[in-house]
Image: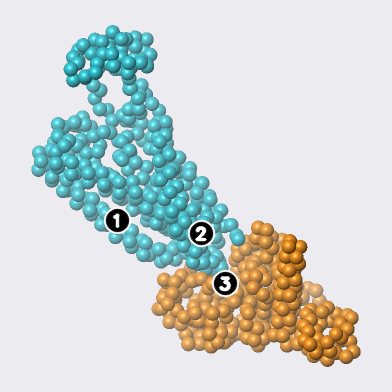
Chain colours: A orange, B cyan
Amino acid sequence: MDATRLNADLVRVQGVAKRFGRTTALSDCTFTLPRGSVTALVGPNGAGKSTLLSLIAGLAKPTRGEITVNGTPVRGRMHPDVSLLTQRRPLYDHFTVREMMRAGGAINERWSAERADEVLGLLGGVDRDAKVGTLSTGARTQVSIALALGRLPEVLLLDEPLSDLDPLARDETLRIVMTEVAERGTTVLLSSHLLTDLGDVCDNLLLLDEGRVQVAGEIEDILTDHQVLVGPAGAAPPADGTVVDTSHTVRQTTVLLRGGTAPEGWQTEHPDLESLVMSYLRASRTRRAATKNGRRAVSG
Amino acid sequence: MIWIVWRQQRTLFITLAVGLVLGVAGVLALRAMMTADFTGAGLGGCLRDVAQSGGVCGADPNGAVQVTWTARMRNGQLLMLALPALVGVFIGAPLYAREFEQGTHALAFTQSVSRTRWMATKFLVTAVPAFAAVLVMQLAVGSWIEAAGSIGPLQNGRFVQAVFDNDGVSPAAYTLFAFTLGTFAGALFRRTLLGMTLTLGVFVVVRSLVFSFRESLGATKRVVSDDPFAKSAPDGAWELNGGYLNAKGEVITNRLEISGKCIGNDPTQADPQAIEKCFRENGVVKSFRDVIPADALGSLHLAEASIFLALSVLFVAGTVWAVRRQT
């Protein structure tokens, strides 16, 4: 049973921490990505999402802890089974798309020109003779994805692949990724702010805040594990389970509860993905503001 | 990977090739014009090897033709002096800095190229054409200077700064130094403009500094002449020091005092034989020159080049570190 679980987890992150000088970007991150899963990586700005992705890719070294992909540890250079699409989507602007793909073939040990070309041909298709610098943001993203998928990765890491895209290009980009998942069973971890888009395509959630994993697992399980309680203002808080977030209005109190059971007198329902993530993010912001105010009070 | 670097730097390489063709053609044309001008002015006899003519050929150094061409050759030498700095500033410094600035380094690093290989390939593919250009220009300008023979810059020997710096292994050493300095500054600060500025500044300072102690890099030899008043024939050596010796062979230290006493206030009124006599009466027996002899030219070039080579090795190591360091 344990052995099959080990095999099923393509990416294992164990106690990973990353510090840049005195600032801690990640601390004690432990989670796994099951083979073939599509995981949404969410968290507020500066939560450590990009750092985590570059650590898994092997672009940066963790300060502590270990990451393995497909059973082999990731150490200091790009893991051959991983493709990473970074946020800036760097490309050589004065190359043509065709030259860019030739470059992809030249700097990869495993490279499928057919696969890259196939991705370029998807949707409206990208003009192979256009200079990369002249492409629209959507087409540029498509070229970057073609470069990432030409490596025939088992793990595809996407850092904000949908940012700067108009709604149509956003849908199309997600369609390319989902086609890849359907055809090749690629494991995907993608970070994004656009929760509505993610709900339809992701089956797993990884919620990162202040460099720590807050929630990790299958979205369905997570949603079942949480309850939104609505009760009268001043009602006694739930006795068991973990209160994630509480919000008050004059008449009522709303609580997001993890585990546990709702006490008498509360209305309960399971949250949807968006409201769950929003509650976690709001709670983290409140917590951060409180510590900041506390510090100010001490120093003042 | 080689193809990628070539494609990335295509504009630079084309510019370099065009500049080189124009430069060589220009210098060769100047050389032909100069030879014609000198021959026309009756100085054809001077356009021989300096050694054959003994460094003198009786030409009027203030003649119009000679003044014009001396100035032009001086410009050619200055261009050659600037060339290594230009390579460092415009080719070395942007090599990595521009990629870090535009984020395209991540493009290579997220594929399966190691940082070291990326660094090394970019370095070599760019350095080789840049070096070839400098060396070809060195040969072209060198042949022009050489053609002026004993009325050109070579009449004062090959140790003169403008000649020495453009001779032998020196241009290659300066270029290597400037290029590696540029790549290191660029990779370290990851800013093109900062890298270029630093490269120029450090290059000028280090070059001047090493030049200031160049004479101590060569082995000096004391040449003693039994006739203290004989003019020494030019032998291509670099004279660092000179003076008179007494009967015991010791250097006469109060030389100014003696000449003040013997020559008097008006040197034009003095009688040369009386002066010589006066000098001898004051103990002057022989004269000496401390020189770096002409045959030490090559080893002096090598000694200086090895300083720049050592610095370049440090810069390359620094660049490897700066590129591999993971933030």
Q: Name the residue under label 2.
A: B190
Left or right, A280 with respect to B131, comes to right
Q: Residues within 10 Å of mark 2 (few under 14, many from 20)?
A: many
Q: Do the residues labelled 2 and 1 touch (CB within 8 Å)?
A: no
Question: Given the image, what chain letter belongs to the residue carrying mark 2?
Answer: B
Q: Looking at the image, which residue is at 54% across and 82% down?
A: A165
Rate crowding at label 1 as few (under 14), some (14 to 19) or many (20 or more) other CA atoms within 10 Å: some
Mark 1 highlights which residue?
Answer: B20
- Say if A195 sits above or below B239 in the image: below
In this view of the protein, which residue sits in the foreground, A10 or B76? B76
Determine the residue located farthest toward the top in the rendered image: B281
Q: In this view, does A145 lie above or below B263?
A: below
The residue lying toward the viewer, choosing from A21 and A76, is: A21
Subunit under mark 3: A
Query: Where is the C terminus of chain B found, in terms of image quarters?
Result: bottom right
The residue lying at 77 percent from left, 86 percent from top is A249
- Residue type pointed to by label 1: Leu
Q: Are marks 3 and 1 in contact (CB under 8 Å)?
A: no
x 49%, y 79%: residue:
A137
Query: Residue A62, located in which quarter of the rendered image?
Result: bottom right
Residue matched to label 3? A86
Q: How many marks can you see?
A: 3
